Image (cartoon, helix red, strand yellow):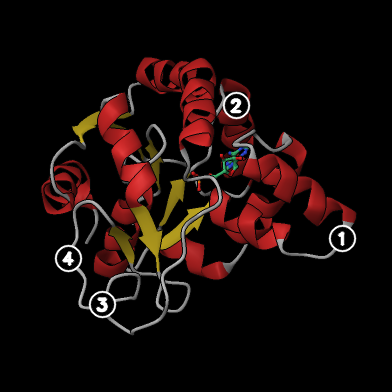
Amino acid sequence: MNNIILIAPPAAGKGTQAALLKEKYNMVHISTGDLLRLEAQEDTERGKYIADLLSHGKLIDDSIVLELLEKKLNESDCDNGYILDGFPRTKDQAILLDELSNRLNKNIDYVIFLDIDRDKAMKRSLGRVSCPECKAIYNEYFDTFKEIGFCNKCGTKLDKRTDDNEETFNNRYDSYIKMTEPVVEYYKSKGILHIVDSSFDKEYTLSQIEKIIGDNND
Ligand code: AMP
């Protein structure tokens, strides 16, 4: 089984691809954004601190993210292969991850970069809604609904993430350019970076990822 990192600008489809890979290959999907959103619901100083940074699209301290990540990687189901979505976001985090994955003997096999231009990513972000119950993800611009505002699968009222607005998207995109592009260079120099065009539909993107990981993922 493989351990994979997905890297992409905000709203490029990391979460969607991770969910598809999870379903097909039974890998564990680790989204640091999800881990942090969960932590932000805690009624503690730390929870409130994280919630505030999240709502402004700012990066959370390495020590907090790393602690949540280590806890998750230590769970035994990660032995079947894991998909990291949203980590590392900076070169410092990439170096911390090398150390952590080495120590836990769960090294990274592939880094997959989902490439998409800014305008398309913004449209995906502003239209994104998800089901709090069954976790299905939709886009208000591209998907059709049996009943507008409700999940096609289970009928629950759909949620919009607090960071899916134009101002926060721009903050997140700018932070991505500044902080995450060096991560792409870091993995390129290690020879494990693969680039996939993520501007088409999710099935096409998945098929490109499978071409990269396919043979080793049985
Ligand atoms: P995501 O769900 O990956 O789009 O992440 C949502 C938000 O969670 C980001 O805008 C950051 O505020 C925070 N976040 C997620 N991953 C990290 C990380 N690796 N380091 C710092 N902050 C993160």
Q: CA distance from mark 3 to mark 1?
A: 37 Å
Give ligand 1's quarter of the image.
top right
* First-in-chain label (2 vs 4): 2
Q: Which residue is mark 4?
A: 144
Residue type for callout 4:
Thr
Q: Which residue is mark 1?
A: 44
Give residue 29's quadrant in the image: bottom left
What is the x, y in percent for residue 103? 64, 43
Q: Which residue is mark 3?
A: 147
Above or below, 120 relative to 72 = above
Above or below, 178 relative to 3 = above
* First-in-chain label (4 vs 1): 1
Q: Residues within 10 Å of mark 4 (few under 14, many from 20)?
A: few
> In the picture provided, is 106 more to the left or to the right than 69?
left
Query: Which labelled disc corresponds to residue 131?
Result: none
What is the x, y in percent for residue 40? 71, 57
* Cβ–Cβ under 8 Å for marks 3 and 1: no
The residue drawn where x is 65% and y is 62% is 38
Q: Which residue is mark 2?
A: 95
* Cβ–Cβ under 8 Å for marks 3 and 2: no
> In the picture provided, is 203 more to the left or to the right than 151?
left
Q: Residue furthest front?
A: 148
Q: Residue furthest bottom?
A: 154
Element carrying mark 3: loop
Q: CA distance from mark 2 to mark 4?
A: 43 Å
Give residue 150's quadrant in the image: bottom left
* First-in-chain label (3 vs 2): 2
Residue type for callout 1:
Thr
The one of 92 and 136 positioned closer to us in this rendering: 136
Q: Residues within 10 Å of mark 3 (few under 14, many from 20)?
A: few
